[in-house]
Amino acid sequence: MNNGHREQWASRIGFILAAAGSAVGLGNIWRFSYVAGEQGGAAFVFIYLIAILLIGYPLMVTEIAIGRKTQKNPIGAFKSLAPDTPWWIVGALGVLTAFVILSFYSVVAGWSLAYTFKAFGGFVPGLDYEGIFISHITDVYMPIFWHAAFMILTLVIIASGVVKGIQRWSKVLMPLLFAILLALVVRGLTLEGAGAGVAFYLTPDFTEISGETFLTALGQAFFTLSLGMGALITYGSYLSQKENVSDSAGWVVGMDTLVALLAGFAIFPAVFAIGFDPAGGVGLAFITLPAVFAEMPLGGLFGFLFFLLLTIAALTSAISLLEVVVAWLIDEKGWDRLKASMLMGLIIFVVGLPPTLGYSVLSGVTIFGMDILDTYDFLSGNILLPLGGLLTSIFAGYIWRAKSVIDEANNPKGKIVFGQWYGYVIQYLLPLAIGAVLIWGIISTFI
Ligand code: PFF
Ligand code: NA
């Protein structure tokens, strides 16, 4: 249904909530806690926060500005700002990255969906939550079933369109997730033995820092803010000229960061209280949180609500990933929305099968010591997203030009004003910092 009239968000709040819906997801709770746990805690969190502020925020404004200026999907956007050049490849890299991320994101979201139903059995004290998690992921059929269920939910929403589909869903549910997270923080902090977890989370030990820590922190900043692959170019393309870009982005970054930091307070004190290993990997949140629910009155009910809301948060992120791919097919190839959503949903489901089976039939397969899901996660989060961000900042600083971004970011004038400083940030700070961390991080991870 491409009749020349492009959909727009119905209001500023609509855009902010949709972009925050894209940002806030499994990245804040599942991925943030497991990478922070693996990378030693507080020192990692400190570097992550610097990356959010110095790199994440300016890049988010840049991506939204590119989208709003061009009113296009990522490939179309680069084409229209730099016609007859190879810069469209950056957009294409984003579309490719969306495939990889969504395919494993849906697998983890499937775990969350499954846990929503597991909560009905009640989360009660004394159960072996590690064993329960392992038996869930090592089963062959259940993870496939939940992965498929989640992909179907995602494509149904995308097939119904930007405003009706995405915006409606992003509105009421986030505040509720936030409230449950707060309750979890209180319960986690008051468990016996929680102090060691607070120390792990808040007392940095910079002696353990390596290139890998920096790369993981940078990758996490990109992943959590949905940067480096054109999701926010796409969402910005539906933003009206009446709304200010830099203020809206400020809200999105603030909300995302708050949820991640709270998730850390909900998880790490509990990890130590139950005597679990913070470097326990992808299962950290799924093993720890049920144990916390078990210690709460009405734990089953809270657990059910929490995993339901986590699944919905994942859904509002997944739809932004699928929308990148679908918007490209609609804009550039003239496909209709329904057909594009269905076919791409199916392909992504298939690409997601190897990580789904990575703990059962394919459990023998490892790449550089990582299982298949870790490999998808590492490749997309720590390599493809920073690479996309690096190229986007070079493009914005030297091809489209800082001045154009500044004009778009300040139009109409908002509270946060972009000035000349942005020129230095986009031309020097971002390319040098991202480039250096990528090279150093890759070397120190693999050598
Ligand atoms: N930002 C999402 C999260 O933190 O869960 C994940 C994500 C969504 C990454 C959309 C990239 C993206 F384009
Ligand atoms: Na996030």
Image (cartoon, rainbow, N blue to C red):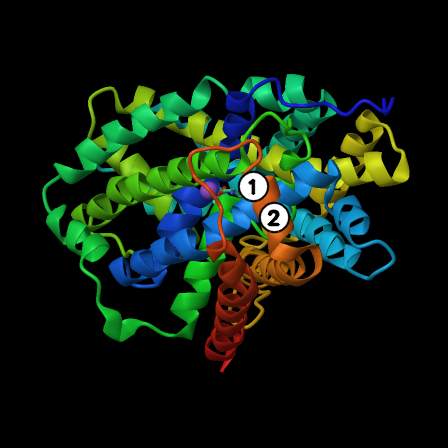
Secondary structure at numbered mark 2: helix
**Relative to 81, is 373 on the left or the right?**
left
Query: At 90% from the left edge and 34% from the top edge, which residue is drawn?
Result: 334
Query: At 38% from the left edge and 22% from the top edge, which residue is drawn?
Result: 175
- Can you tell which mark lies on residue 288? none
For the residue carrying disc 1, how many other residues have a C-alpha within 10 Å: few (<14), some (14-19), or many (20+)?
Answer: many
Q: Closest to the observer: 160 or 279?
A: 160
For the residue carrying disc 2, how many other residues have a C-alpha within 10 Å: few (<14), some (14-19), or many (20+)?
Answer: many
**Relative to 115, is 124 on the left or the right?**
left
* Residue 325 versus residue 50 in the image, above or below: above
Residue for badge 2 = 405
Asked whether the beta carbons under mark 1 and mark 2 sit within 8 Å of each other, the answer is yes
* Residue 304 versus residue 63 in the image, above or below: above
* Residue 167 versus residue 42 in the image, above or below: above
Residue 152 image offset from top left, x and y in percent:
67, 28
Residue 435 image offset from top left, x and y in percent:
54, 71
